[in-house]
Amino acid sequence: MNSTTPTVLIVPGLRDHVADHWQTLLAAKLAKVRSVPPLEHDKLSCAARVSAIDRALQDIEGPVVIVAHSAGAVMVAHWAGAHSTHRVRGALLAAPADLETPMPAGYPTTEVLASHGWLPLPRAELPFPSIVAASSNDPLARLDRARELARCWGSRLVELGTVGHLNPSSGFGEWPRAEALIRELS
C-alpha cells in the first residue's frame, strides 16, 4: 500500500459507534482507517461534532475519503462549510438523516436539534466529490429529501432500494457495496 492510498475516516451518526453496524465492521476490514471518536460531553452539539471531525482529520497524514452515516452525513456537510477540505478526495454519505423533518420516537426533536446548531441543514455544494447512498424506505429521510440533499451537495445519488436506515435494525451488519463506492472516490 502506498502513501497515496487514502485513509478512510468513519463518521458515525448521533448514536456513535455500534458494534454490529456496517461502519464498525468496515473499519475492522480496512488497512488505513480512522474513526471519529465518540464525544464525552455535548453529544448533541453540532459544533462539538464538527470539531471532532476536524481533530480526527488533523491526526491523519495524506489523502482521506470520508464515510459518513445518518446525521454523520449532515456533520460532514457542516464541517465542509467551515474547514479546509483540500486533503479530502471524496465522501460517501450513506442514509443522510433529514433533521428538518420530525423523526420517529426516540430521536431528538427538530426543536432540540435546532437549539444544538444542526438546523438549517447545509445546502452548499461540497468542495469534493461525494456520493449520497439513499434508501426508498428510510424512516429518517424520505427519498425525495435525500435526492434534494444530493442535488444541493453536488453529490451523485445512488438509490439503494428498500434498505431502511441501512443500520442493524434494518437488517444491515455487513454492507459490501460500501467498499465499491469508497473505491470510486479513492
Image (tube, rainbow, N blue to C red):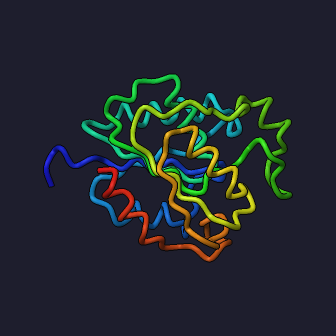
- Against 115, is 63 above or below? below
At 62% across and 32% down in the image, what residue appears? 122
**Furthest residue in direction left, as rendered:** 2
Q: Position of residue 162 (x, y in %)?
A: 64, 73
Q: Position of residue 170 (x, y in %)?
A: 66, 73
At 51% across and 45% down in the image, what residue appears? 37
At 68% across and 35% down in the image, what residue appears? 121
**Left or right: residue 58 compared with residue 155:** left
Q: Position of residue 52 (x, y in %)?
A: 52, 34
**Left or right: residue 9 compared with residue 3:** right
- Foreground residue among 154 and 128: 154
- Foreground residue among 175 and 16: 175
**Furthest residue in direction bottom, as rendered:** 171
> How many numbered marks are there?
0
At 68% across and 72% down in the image, what residue appears? 169
Q: Position of residue 120 (x, y in %)?
A: 72, 31
User: What is the quadrant of residue 58 in the picture?
Assistant: top left
**Left or right: residue 18 compared with residue 35:** right
- Foreground residue among 122 and 113: 122
- Where the N terminus falls, by quadrant? bottom left
